[in-house]
Amino acid sequence: AARARSAIVAQLLAARRAQLGEAQTPVARLLAALQSLARRPTVVAIAQPGSVDDLVHVRAVLGGALPVVRARTGVVRAEIEQTRRLQASAALAASALRDSRAQLESDRVALARLEAAHRQRSQALGRHAIGESDRALALGEQARDLVDQLSARDLAQATATDLAQLDGPLPRPVATAAAMARPSGAYRLPVGGRLVTGLDEVSAAGVRSRGLTFAVEPRAPVRAPAGGTVRYARQFRDFGMIVIIDHGDGWTSLLTGLGRLAVTPGQAVAAGAMLGRAGVGDDAAVTVELRRCGRPMDIVALL
């Protein structure tokens, strides 16, 4: 806008100068003639040949031309004044253009600085966002670990609750005089072999053992662990041949896994007497259980 205004003022100023030049031409000629007459001495004008009528005529012409000269010079002065105003407008337009350019340059510099500041801010925010994203991932992993821990704790609590509702293991008998009254005679192991299952041990099938199980040689001899009366001696389900010996005072011994019997029910046997032999096969095993009033007892405490 400033450039357009300056161009318009320049065009108007050029046109006004042309008009002023055209108006100044006749006035300049007239002024030159008057100046030339003014330089001539008065005596020369009086001594100039011609009649007094000529002088009067010249005087009249000059008197009539003076108002015209004043009028034309007034117009020229007005045009000169308008030209000066146009020149002032041109100067003002040029000054406004310079100020606008300076302001524009200042705005460009400020904009460049602002853009650089925003770019740095954007980069900082980008790095911060990456850091926050990593922190969010870390918090997510921690939250997942906490959820897993809570799940494991809930599972452990549920397992503990279920276990608390189960029957606990039978306590081993306390070796008191009343409860641990020995059966008649010394108590001994009925077979020689490798112990494979102990008292109260839980098998893979979830069954709790009530005695001791030994892996023995095929047809190994099985002897009475203590003296007593044979109350049962025959096949029983898939336990093979079994023997039950009554030792008196509520004490009984149960032996399973025999392949052949050497006693009969009602027979009195002494400690170490032959009861029979173990079964055949590589997995031959004999189990002995000591009970008092039907409750399993720890044989080791009596050996």
Image (spheres, rainbow, N blue to C red):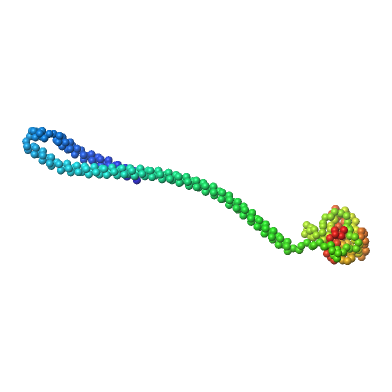
Q: Quadrant of residue 245?
A: bottom right
| Residue 150 in sight here | yes
Total numbered labels: 0
In the picture provided, is 37 more to the left or to the right than 129? Answer: left
Front in this rendered view, residue 41 or 218: 41
In the picture provided, is 7 more to the left or to the right than 277? Answer: left
Relative to 278, residue 178 above or below: below
Front in this rendered view, residue 104 or 232: 104
Q: Position of residue 207 (x, y in %)?
A: 79, 60
Q: Position of residue 201 (x, y in %)?
A: 80, 58
Task: Name the residue at the front extreme.
Answer: 177
At a point 76% along the width and 63% down the height, the residue shown is 167
Q: Quadrant of residue 256?
A: bottom right
At a point 31% along the width and 42% down the height, the residue shown is 91
At a point 78% along the width and 57% down the height, the residue shown is 204
Relative to 55, residue 216 above or below: below
Q: Position of residue 271 (x, y in %)?
A: 92, 60
Relative to 104, residue 171 above or below: below
| Residue 26 in sight here | no
In the picture provided, is 232 more to the left or to the right than 48? Answer: right
Q: Position of residue 23 (x, y in %)?
A: 21, 40
Q: Quadrant of the C terminus?
A: bottom right
